[in-house]
Image (tube, rainbow, N blue to C red):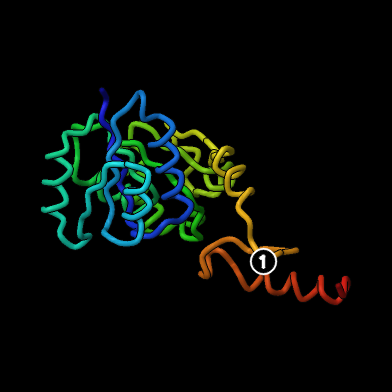
Amino acid sequence: MTKIVHVLFSSKLGGAEQVAINISKNLSGSYNFVYVSPSGPIQESLKTLGIQYQSFTPKKICEFKHKIEALKPDIIHAHDFKASFLVNLLFNNIPIITHIHQAPKWQTSYNWKSIAFQYIAKKSSQIIYVSDWAKESYVFQDKLKNASVIPNGIDTLHVIKMSKVKTSTVFDLLFVGRLEAVKDPERFVKIVKRLLKKFLN
């Protein structure tokens, strides 16, 4: 069975991590998946789902390289920029999927990061973007020959299951995301403030 190793730099459960989990769960009958990331809270989620896991320390590059080689992957699926840069620089004989889940500001202008990503893009077997905007906002997107857009899937069965869980808390409006600038929670607060003035209840 084809072995695919997911490589992520986050140790917590977030959007990219959920995508890797969904791929692993839904394609487990056809592929053998291993999830590789720094150790942290993500391990509990993976253990519950029965997804094979290996940890690594980002600063120990040689150790990371040996761990991946020991897994003997047929494909490396790198999620986001750090993981994509790392695996594309370290591995030459393994097909690499570069999966970009975001559109950082640096990729919209000419700078060392956007130029360096050209090398990664050319070396990757396939580049997957989460949205048209993520792909088109890259300043060198016209040079990408192997890129496609695949929006994040939704595990509808899980959503239906969670909707049946009883809770005493009722929400009219909800922000879902990390409390970081990239998710812009302050904008949500401003929107809520305006809505509260218009709809007092």
User: Vertically, is 136 above or below 75?
Assistant: below
Residue at 63 percent of width and 48 percent of height: 164
Quarter of the figure that contains the C terminus: bottom right
Nearer to the camera, 181 or 116: 181
User: What residue is rendered at 44% in x and 46% in y?
Assistant: 100
> Does residue 201 lie above or below 133 as drawn?
below
Q: What crowding class fits label 1: few (fewer than 14 Cα within 10 Å), some (14-19), or many (20 or more)?
A: few
Q: Which residue is at the front of the view, 57 or 50? A: 50
The quadrant in which residue 110 appears is bottom left
Q: From the viewer's perspective, tell me whether residue 99 is left or right of residue 2.
A: right
Q: Which residue is mark 1?
A: 169
Give the residue displayed 20% in from the left and 60% down from the top: 57
Number of marks in picture: 1
- In which quarter of the view is residue 91 placed? top left
Q: Is 134 placed above or below 122 here?
A: below
* Picture coordinates of residue 36, whole percent (x, y): 27, 48
- Amino acid under label 1? Thr
Image coords of residue 98 (percent x, y) = 37, 41
**In the image: residue 44, left or right of residue 152:** left
Find numbered disc 1 in the image and state the secondary structure of the residue it sits on.
Answer: loop
Query: Residue 102: x and y, percent?
Result: 49, 52
Find residue 158 and report its horizontal and vertical position in percent: 54, 42
The residue that appears at 50% across and 49% down in the rendered structure is: 139
Q: For residue 184, what is the image quadrant? A: bottom right
Quadrant into which the N terminus falls: top left
* Foreground residue among 145 and 134: 134
Looking at the picture, tell me which residue is in the foreground, 72 or 87. 72
